[in-house]
Structure formats: structure tokens, C-alpha cells
Amino acid sequence: MFSLALRSVRQRPGRLIATLLSAFLGAAIIMTFNSMHDTAAAQGVDDVSAESLTTAASVVGGYGTLLVFFAVASTLTVNVRQRGEEISLLRSTGATPAQIKRMVVGEAAVVALVGSLLAIGPAMLGGQALLGMFQDSGQVADGVDFSFGPIALMSGIDIALLASVGAAFLAVRRATRAAAGERKPRGRLRSFAGCAAVLAGAAGVLSTFAFDAKDAALMAAPAYGAILLSVGFALLSPKLLRALLGTLARPLEALTGASGHLTVLNMRRRADQLAGVLMPLIVFTGMATATLYMQAVESDAIKASGLAKSVEDKNLETLNFVVVGIIVVFSCIMLINSLYAATSYRGREFGQQRLAGATPGQVLGMVGVEGLVLTTTGVFFGTVAGLAGILPFSAVRTDTLVPGQGLGIWLTIVGVAAAATLITSIATARRTLRTPAVEAVTLAA
């Protein structure tokens, strides 16, 4: 079946472009920051420079790994769900579930390996640029030379492969069970993991009050707590979306008419699939909100004290801005990637709706309202996670519960999230609707 997987990749490469992009970007991020471990371990690097490099690699490398798993898992899940008819056909022609699993997992492994190898060059350039940034800010000595070694290389390849193979295995197992007519699993493991992440995040946030205002590690507890809350909400997003739809169903139908009615019906049925879009949206909003506001509070507190920023303060500020930059770029690309894959696959669904009497305008309206609901849901729960970290940090650091930085940062984050979601979904739907309805219905999935 592995040879069949190779032929499948060669025959239909376009189907796996989204997965390849996820693996490529994920491996590039992981290799870029883990190359700081290789650089810190090189001969002749002083202790201060080595500590700065190791801190950057450990903190941002951990964030990057988390984002890679989310991105690859959501992309592969969408990909496998799109192949439901293909898997059913393979089952009807005699293929066993184990053979189908080996084929799909083999495809994922091949694509992940290719994506990781393609990421080596950009990761080396990114690592050199990152080292230069640390040197320009005075955190690393100018004489330190960049090194790209086994830590960066193996971590990028291993994590991309593990995320791809694991996500593909879980997704194809669900698909083969559905093709065999088994009852849909209730997702208890996912719900358990989501609840555990929420509880751990709440504990991390509450532990902020155990620190002193001037502790160097003060920001760590609320930051990690907000991240864990974001991850927990992302894992629980299907249930959260259904609960929100129950509240918004009547207002949506009253405000948008037929488009709103179609939106509620479709989103309730596709809540599990839409989780792949909500995951990067919630994580992006929560992590970006928490990190940017806490850094703003810290910078204003140092400025108010009349003290100059130390090397540690500069290191922390640089790390936070680099983290947010990575989150913004990676999460937005993954959000666009997931939305494009999910929306472009719905050509048959759109064709059936048009044959049933819906106009192209109503279909586009439905997609637009869906994007608005997704944005609202993702921004709401991401903001809750971010505030859970910001408020305790502000209370301990400045003795003020609500920070005085205003809504400008948050509105920028919301604007980026809304633009990425709405523009991608509507533009993809418009492109899909160019296919005549009868032709769209008769096309193979």
C-alpha cells in the first residue's frame, strides 16, 4: 500500500498541497528556532549569549511545536474527510481498513518528509536573520557565528513527521469506521483533553498571584495559562460552536433571512469539520492578545519606574514580539489554508443548494454569515483566554486589574482575524460557484 500511496501523491498532488504547506511552514519554524540550540552549543559562545539563544529556542520552539501539531492535524483532517467517497470505494472493492490506513498514513509521511526537506533552506536563512536580530539588540555577542546542526534538522523532520502520521492515522480511522457504517465516535478523548487543558490553564493563571511584582518569571505563568486555555477552547470548539449557534440561531435568521437559516443548518451539521478553522483562530486570538498586552503592561511599568531596560528586559520583549510575529503569520496562513480547503470542497453542496432553489447570492450570503459566526466564536473564546492571563498579570505587576492600554491592540487582532476569515471564505466560494450547478453535483468528490 505504500507504493500505492506514492502513486496517489504523484497522480493527485493538488489534493495534498495544503498538507505540504502546513508541514513546510511548521518544519521551517521549528528548525529556525531550534538552530539557536545548535548555535548556543558551538565552541567559543559566552554564557550570556548561550543563555539568550537557549531561552529563545526553548520558549518559541515550544510554541512552534504546538502550532505545528494544530495546523497539520486540522489540515489533514479536512483532507481525509474530503476523501470519504474514495475510501468507501476502496472498501467496496476489497481493501481492508488496515490497507487504507497504511495508504493514507504513507501519503502523509511522504508529504511531511518532502515539506521538511524543502524547509531546510528557508530555516537556515531564518535562523541567520534571528541571530542577527539578537546581536543587534545586544543580547548576543557580535562574534557568535550561526550554526545549523542536528538539533534543528532532526527536530523539524521528526515533529513534522510525527504530527502528520499521527493526525492522518486518527483521521483515516474515523473515515474507515464511517465507511463501514459504524456509529460516529463521540470524541470523548478530545473533550477530556480540552477540559484538562482548560483546568491546567486556569491553574497557571491563578498561580500568577503567587509571584512578586518584580519577579523575572512573573509573565511566564499567565502567558502559559492563557495558551493552555486557548488550546482547551480550541479542542472543545465543536461543542462551543453548537452552544453559540443555539443562542444566535433566531437573531441570525431574523437579520439575514434565508442565508441565516442556511447558515445555522449547515454549521450545526458541520460543527466538527469547522473545528479545523476555529482552532487556529482561537489560538491566534488568545496568544496574540495575551502576549501583546502583557508586554505593553510590562514596558509601561518599567517606563513609569524611571529605570532603563536591562538585557533581560530586552530579551523578553524581543521574544514576545517574535512570538507574536510567528503566531500572526503562521496562524493566518493556516487559517487561510484550512478555510480554502474546506470551502473549495463544498462545490457539490453549493450545487445541490442551487438546484434546490437557492440563488448564488444566497449561497454567498450563507458563506459570509458562516465566516462572521466563526470569527465571532473564535475571537470571543480567544479573547476570554487572553483576558484570563492579562488581568492577573496586570493586577500583580501594577496593582491595577484592568490595564490602561486601551482597545487598539485588540481591535487590530480582531481586524486581522476577521479579514483572513471573511475574505478567504467568500473569495473561495465565489470561485467555486463559477462551476455550473449540474456539473458541480456530478463531479466526483
Image: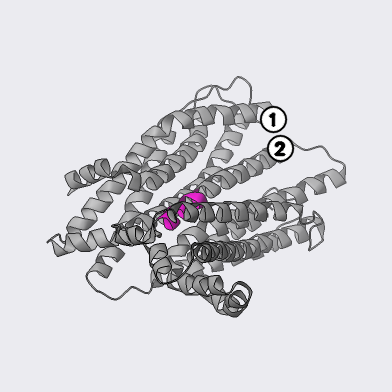
- Residue marked by disc 1: 137
Is 112 positioned to the left or the right of 202 in the image?
left
Mark 2 and mark 1 lie on one chain; the one further toward the N terminus is 1
Q: At which x and y percent is residue 79?
A: 35, 55
Residue that lies at the very extreme toward the left in this rendered image: 94
- Residue at 22%, 47% (x, y): give it: 5
Q: Is residue 170 above or below residue 122?
A: below
How many neighbours does mark 2 have within 10 angstroms: few (below 14), some (14-19), or many (20 or more)? some
Q: Is residue 234 above or below residue 324?
A: below
- Residue at 23%, 60% (x, y): give it: 87
Q: Is residue 207 visible?
A: no
- Confirm whether the magenta stretch covers residue 162: no
How far apart are the alpha carbons under marks 2 and 1?
A: 7 Å
User: SS of the residue at dot 1?
Assistant: loop
Q: Magenta stretch?
A: 334-344
Which label sits on residue 314?
A: 2
Dot 1 amino acid type: Ser
Q: At which x and y percent is residue 127?
A: 53, 30
Dot 2 amino acid type: Lys
Residue 407 figure quarter: bottom right
Dominant secondary structure, magenta: helix
Count of residue discs: 2
Q: At which x and y percent is residue 195?
A: 50, 70
